[in-house]
Amino acid sequence: MTDETELSADEIIEQKAVRLAKRATLLETGEAYPVSVPVTDTIGAVRAAHQGLDVDVSTGVTAALAGRIVHSRNTGKLCFAALQSGDGERIQAMLSLDVVGEDALERWKDLVDLGDHVFVTGEVITSKRGELSILVSEWQMAAKSLLPLPNLHAELNEETRVRQRYLDLIVRDQARQNVVTRATAMASLRETFAKHGFLEIETPMLQTMHGGAAA
């Protein structure tokens, strides 16, 4: 994200105020941060199980999954959202007035923002453009985001990437892959050493108490 595409401090404060008001509404009518949601599928698993479908197909398969909203578009009787999982997999959620109902559709329009985690249940379909989607029959807020996401189509500047690491992990595939690669390598090393009888002993270099020459 370049300097020209970053939100100003005033804009962030304004957006946070709007989101806080939406969170208050969620808390009055239900829950903004439920302890759990009844997820039965992952976005990656749904995509893997429904590759190569034709355009405008109804599979008859129901999926229940959760993801972060990274793109959103609302029209009169239809709402579209791209849901992203922690590993970067994405799937489109479609909310139709005929399927989800007027109340649920209006609540989506009024309460949902980019960055929110939502839980959706619905049939796995392909859209008229051939995009794999969930035709939502029910939805629930899984975690309300209070801060706006950066522009996902622009590069994060170096300072933002360092100071706001969570944004880097949301936006950049390479940042997420680096974390996965490191975790995989460390797990492999630990497993190999353990098989050969080695013990892992923590020897912290930085301590809260003075030691050595500073004691």
Image: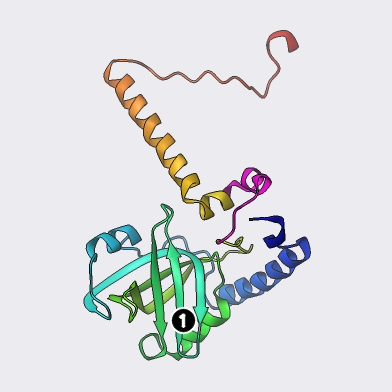
What residue is rendered at 56% in x and 74% in y? Answer: 26
- Does residue 167 appear to the left or right of 193 in the view shown? right
Q: State the image quarter where residue 139 is shown.
A: bottom left
Q: What element carries label 1?
A: strand
Q: Where is residue 202 in the image (x, y as percent from the top left)?
A: 49, 20
From which residue to which does the magenta span run? 153-166
Q: Position of residue 73 (x, y in %)?
A: 51, 78
What residue is rendered at 31% in x and 75% in y? Answer: 130
User: Between 185 and 145, which is closer to the camera in this rendering?
Assistant: 185
Q: Is residue 154 magenta?
A: yes
- Amino acid at circle 1: Cys
Q: Where is residue 70 in the image (x, y as percent from the top left)?
A: 51, 65
Task: Please give the residue where the numbered disc 1 appears in the rendered image.
Answer: 79
Is 87 placed above or below 111 here?
A: above
Is 120 placed above or below 76 here?
A: above
Q: Is residue 84 visible?
A: yes
